[in-house]
Image (spheres, rainbow, N blue to C red):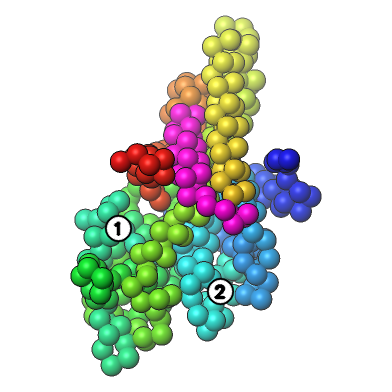
Amino acid sequence: MLDYRLDAETEALRKTVREFSVEVIAPQIGEFYERDEFPTAIVRQMGELGLFGLPFPEEYGGSGGDYFTLCVALEELARVDSSMAITLEAGVSLGAMPIFRFGTEEQKQQWLPRLCAGEALGAFGLTEPGGGSDAGATRTTAKLEDGHWVINGSKAFITNAGTEITDLVTVTAVTGTRPDGGGKEISAIVIPSGTPGFAVGKRYSKVGWNASDTRELSFSDVRVPEENLVGERGRGYAQFLSILDEGRIAISALAVGLAQGCVDESVKYAAQREAFGQPIGRNQAVQFMIADMEVRASTARLAYYRAAEKMLRGEPFKREASIAKLYSSEMAMENARYAAQVHGGYGFMNEFPVGRFYRDAKILEIGEGTSEVQRMLIARSLGVG
């Protein structure tokens, strides 16, 4: 029998993250958006709550939970702010998870305790300036010389890459040609922050996620030890594709949080705002908009719950992850549009949360696999094309 009720431990976590989001993040996050500034202190507090260690074993400083508990935390954060949610999602799913899934025991012992504690952040450099969705067209190269990888190239749109607590970036690079057909051999390599030749660009000026850190990276004869290879040589791209499948469930949870936050704010505003002598919530047009928003958020939540359930059972979940990511990101965008409409002129003001939600929603249809890529993957899974 399917049971989507949260167990007592997960429900307690959800309430803790909800309380933290409302009491700590909500009162101050708008100021960080205005200043386009990364809130290191808030991120450290998230680390103290144990959020960065949720899906990792206790032996590496984690909480011993699973990926679903991370998703629940992401949803609650994103109900209030997506910048802090994506900082957590990228720090765990892209920064720490590749090392946990594919790294050596030495790499895990070296990097994971600080990452799990939120004392440090990790990033993953996959996308390149000319690459976009075509991650297989990697141009960054890494050549072995005297026991060191020498790395040259650049990466674009990398989250958590340049904060004052960023410890490492794992990058994909061409390390040779594959023996089977002569295609590119792509491997993953850890580059610690501050390594000579590793340059971190200025923070991008973004439409949304203004309190998260996103940068371009460049590598000019960057030398790191041969043992910084993560996983098997030549398996870097395949490894990351599996990480992306998991990450799509996490992004779906984040999108559901934003969609639900739009409902929360619209319900509150509809009760407070009066027009023509009564609260606007008494108008059927507003009621129907909010009802439709709740339907979207609730249905999208079921989609990511289903994908997470299959993943935790050890069953194939690639299609379900793409369905959840596609549907929830598009529903988040719709809810942001509706919430702005419910708020009228105030929905266009940055001081209101729905203004941030509207700006933050669009990237959800782009990051970690565009909507078009998700449709392509779903069609392929059905044997079409």
Residue 291 visible from this viewpoint: yes
Residue 156 in the image: above or below residue 291 = below
Residue 111 percent location from the top left of the image:
52, 77
Q: Is residue 28 visible?
A: no
The stretch in magenta equals: 311-335
Camera-side residue: 89 or 68?
Answer: 68
Task: Look at the numbered discs 2 and 1 and tell me whether their residues touch, using CB distance below 8 Å.
Answer: no
Q: Is residue 238 left or right of residue 86?
A: left
Label 2: element kind:
helix
From this view, report whether residue 200 is shown above or below residue 296.
Answer: below
Magenta-drawn stretch, dominant element (helix, strand or loop): helix
Identity, as a three-letter code, of the amino acid under mark 1: Ala
Identify the secondary structure beneath mark 1.
helix
Please name the residue that numbered disc 1 is placed on.
135
Q: Quadrant of the N terminus?
A: top right
- Badge 1: residue crowd in 10 Å (few <14, some 14–19, many ≥20): some
Q: Nearer the viewer, residue 314 or 321?
A: 314
Q: Magenta stretch: residue 327 in it?
A: yes
Between the residue at mark 2 and the residue at mark 1, the CA separation in whole angstroms equals 26 Å
Any magenta on residue 290?
no
Which mark, by number, is residue 112?
A: 2
For the residue marked with disc 2, what is the amino acid? Leu
Q: Which residue is at 44% across, 56% downward?
A: 244
| Residue furthest to the bottom | 146
Q: Nearer the viewer, mark 2 or mark 1?
A: 1
Disc number at residue 121?
Answer: none
In this view, the residue in front, 110 or 100, is 100
Residue 309 at what x, y percent from top left? 62, 48
Q: Residue at x 40, y 76 (%)?
A: 232
